[in-house]
Amino acid sequence: MSEPATYPVDPAVERLARMLQDAFVDYHDRFLEITHRASGRFLGRDWAAHQSDATERLGLHKALVYGVVDAARLVLPDDDLAARSLWIQTRRRYVHLVGERMDLELAETFYNSVTRRLFDIVGLDDELEFLWLGPTALPADDGSRGEYRVFPMEGSLVDCVREIFEHSPLASHFADLDGDAARVAGRVAALLDDIWDGQLDAIEVLRPIFFRNKGAYVVGRLRWLNRVSPIVIPLVNTERGVHVDAVLLTETDASRLFGYTRSYFHVLCRRPAAVVGFLKSLLPVKPVAELYTSIGYSQHGKTNLFRALYRHMEHSNTRFERARGARGMVMAVFTLPSFDVVFKLIKDRFAPTKRTTPEEVKRRYKLVFNHDRVGRLVDAQEFTNLSFQRDRFDEDLIDELRNDCARTVTITDDEVVLHHVYTERRLYPLDLYLREMAPDRARAAAVDYGYAVKDLAAAAIFPGDLFPKNFGVTRHGAVVFYDYDELALLEDINFRTMPVSQSYEDEMSDQPWFPVESHDVFPEEFRTYLRSPRVVGEVMDTRHPELCTVEFWKEMQALHRSGELPDFYPYPEELRFRATD
């Protein structure tokens, strides 16, 4: 289908379609080239270079899209109707050029990204965009096309696992392949006794290795009859060589690994839909949008979220309403109760205590997008010009948007247009969770709250505002940060010891009696607001007292200045072999 069309094609149409095709091919080739480096970075233990690669890869899509937008404007006529007609023809020609590609879905997203910027589309435009909102099917693959290998249970379980490792691209680098196979087989056997009475037909394993941060992951599934269960094997590379660090055998553990609070994997695949289809069989609750995003295709993940939202609107009648939790001073936050996402709009005016600007808020969201999120920062998608029927909005919410967000929202008698909005997965606000959940759950969340702050510090992030209302709890019970309006890099903060007052008047003053700069932070003050509710105060005193000391924060700053990258394990410590074996 990449041959010239059999019907006459306008030269301008051909030029535009080829321009789109060439830019998309360039984007995905460069994406895969960067992804290919991950294996060498892992084996060379060059973690800084891997992080640099991740940042470079994140910027590719936007750079190539903007390049096409600028070039296309030089070709399209000035008349809006003529430009629209020409672009509709361009879309049809583009389909002929990319229709047989294995990454067709990504090619459609690339086209849509260019189109929405060229024509400032509000809401949906099914003439200009690829907008199918009906059912879609991920590839059903029996392994014959090569996305995964099938390892039948023809001998012992240890032999089967050993064969998996021997076929791995990292096989020659294992420090103790036989020992690792025995350890993994032991855990798998214990699981099989519990779930399938020890039965197993085969282990099916994706061919590409998944790389992220300092880890590599073998991703597969156990199969007996028509039943499947995840098997994900994390690998680490030490001075002794590559060895297995754990084995993840539950949907919950695998889901956490592919969660929306973590950075994206580097996975070398030319047919992304097949990899996503395989992952969906392991994680049936995980949205397809998140699975695409998890393997680095965040723009196509955004496309899937966009389509899922509008599809949901067609098949539901719930109304947008304010999200649960404390009202924000910088963002208006609302949700559709039947759709697991929150929408966040920057307000026109901020409370006097908030020393920031809309541009600074956008910069912080961009920082989170590019930064290692270590499982503690919620991924956010940025949208422009989303349009919905007005009757789908609660009237109290309409009043709030009209009064607080007039610069970013247009409200008419029939329509609400969100000109600039961020979306995030909906979480249970930590302040409500601590009050509403049973004592054991509340205490567990309070403990993880402290670990969340420590993990962010280890990732060179200072949340800015540590109040529980700015954190949320995932469905797996992890505490994560989601309010970015005061977030900062750790290196930009000046952690200070509170000066000793010299008089009674100093102590009673409403204002600081000593000079304070905008980036000064006094960790001793954390004790004041890390004591409510009571369970938080108890946990902080017993489990995380160092968070209230200057020494802890300065040590973390020194760690990052030295260039050392901390270890983060996206699975429980008790699953690690070194911790138990």
Image (cartoon, rainbow, N blue to C red):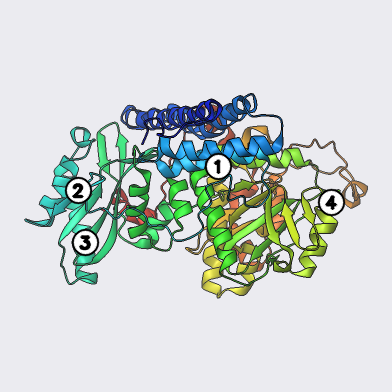
Q: Residue at x 43, y 63 (%)?
A: 285
Amino acid of disc 4: Ala
Which image quarter: residue 215?
A: top left
| Mark toward the start of the polypeptide (2 vs 3) | 2
- The image quadrant where one finds the N terminus is top left
Question: Would you call the spot at circle 3 few (<14 residues within 10 Å), some (14-19), or many (20 or more)?
Answer: many
Query: Is residue 166 left or right of 131 when viewed as pictured?
Result: left
Query: Is residue 293 left or right of 521 when viewed as pictured?
Result: left
Amino acid of disc 3: Arg
Which residue is most to the right? 505
| Residue designated by label 3 | 223
Secondary structure under tag 2 reads loop
Secondary structure under tag 3 reads strand
Secondary structure under tag 4 reads loop
Mark 2 and 3 residues: CB-CB less than 8 Å, in contact?
Answer: no
Which is in the foreground here, disc 3 or disc 4?
A: 3
**Residue 80, placed above or below residue 399:** above
Gap between marks 2 and 3 measured at Cα: 17 Å
| Residue designated by label 2 | 144
Expressed as whole percent of the image width and height from the top left, the position of residue 69 reads 61, 30
**Residue 394 shows in the view:** yes
| Mark toward the start of the polypeptide (3 vs 1) | 1
